[in-house]
Amino acid sequence: MKLLEERIQQDGRILGDEILKVDAFLNHQIDPELMAAMGEEFSRLFANDKIDKILTVESSGIAPAVFAGLSLHVPVVFARKNKSLTLPTTVWAADVYSFTKQTTNQIMIDQQFLKSGEKVLIIDDFLANGQAVNGLLKIASQADAHVVGAGIVIEKTFQKGRQILDEQGIRVESLARVKAFVDGQVAFL
Amino acid sequence: MKLLEERIQQDGRILGDEILKVDAFLNHQIDPELMAAMGEEFSRLFANDKIDKILTVESSGIAPAVFAGLSLHVPVVFARKNKSLTLPTTVWAADVYSFTKQTTNQIMIDQQFLKSGEKVLIIDDFLANGQAVNGLLKIASQADAHVVGAGIVIEKTFQKGRQILDEQGIRVESLARVKAFVDGQVAFL
């Protein structure tokens, strides 16, 4: 998606060898017009898949997911990372390791919001090592829901996320595919 | 906002004396069409305030905030609750006590995304005891930004949030004002 690639070139910042910071428009400050355009693109990509529901993980997945949900006319469920006092005990849950934060979080979805046979689309901001999407796949499997694919805002193709999803037969559609950081610039596939 | 009040009556669940669960359409499962309608309503209420930016707190504030941002054509910044390894040390920060979770979190915004003189609108899902909005007010004060008001999805008028904001001269616009829970039903002001 050209609009997104241009924005990454303009406002993305590279930290070290592997981290691309896009907190100027995606995961701290958010550009709603860009999110709406991305939502329409996800909708176009999965228009024929009869999706019932979108799944994502708090917090950075929420903005792209709700605009995809608006365009596809389906509800969005975001998995929660921390168990709150009011969360019911009847949840689907999976462990997710964050390489960036070097911590393991349990993510969970209330069982009433994910049912057997539902066709779900996973949306997330990044696909790097695939841990978050894999956690949502585990949750969907517990619920006996059918995952039609994963819509990713930014994929880092030099990490193993896509391979992990390919091995499970999951269709992946990424709006921007970053293949390397070269001389402080982002190179796309 | 009638559409929202009807949805609360239909899908809200009352827990104990003080908790209204709206996780069927607002803060776990999200109804994007309802969020878009709420965003337009916030935009109408604050149309003449020349807003530069919307502030909210992860995670439940993000969905209403991004649609308000889309309607008002301004960026949205969500305060983060946990310090990640990649968050810079140059942040505005405030402590927020959660009565629901009985924990204190530090919320923070990168200083590059909130500047002196910016006119900001605070959006949040609930106004109960006012702690989250008050945290954002402290952050805005640190940045010397000007808060034009607070747009709240659901206000519980029997708790002290509005009083705390009134005392600071903050204009509050709530889309639904819950005055009591009567016989398992939600009563609006």
Image (cartoon, coloured by chain):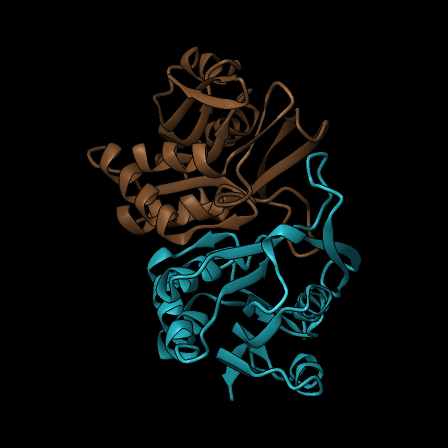
Chain colours: A brown, B cyan
Question: Residue at horizontal 49%, vertical 41%?
Answer: A61
Q: Quadrant of residue A175?
A: top left
Is A157 situated above or below B117?
Answer: above
Residue B187: give x, y in percent of width and height.
Answer: 51, 84
Count of picture labels? 0
Q: Quadrant of residue B61?
A: bottom right
Who is closer to the viewer here, A44 or A89? A44
Who is closer to the viewer here, B138 or A82? B138
Left or right of A32: which side holds A181? right
Q: Is any atom of residue A121 visible in this view?
A: no
Residue A48: give x, y in percent of width and height.
Answer: 19, 33
Question: Residue at horizontal 66%, vertical 28%?
Answer: A100
Left or right of A23: which side holds A116? left
Residue B146: give x, y in percent of width and height.
Answer: 61, 73
Question: Residue at horizontal 48%, vertical 39%?
Answer: A56
Q: Is any atom of residue A129 visible in this view?
A: yes
Query: Where is the N terminus of chain B found, in terms of image quarters?
Result: bottom left
Residue A111: give x, y in percent of width and height.
Answer: 51, 44
Who is closer to the viewer here, B154 or B76? B76
Is A28 situated above or below A171?
Answer: below
Question: Residue at horizontal 58%, vertical 42%?
Answer: A91
Left or right of A132: which side holds A10? left
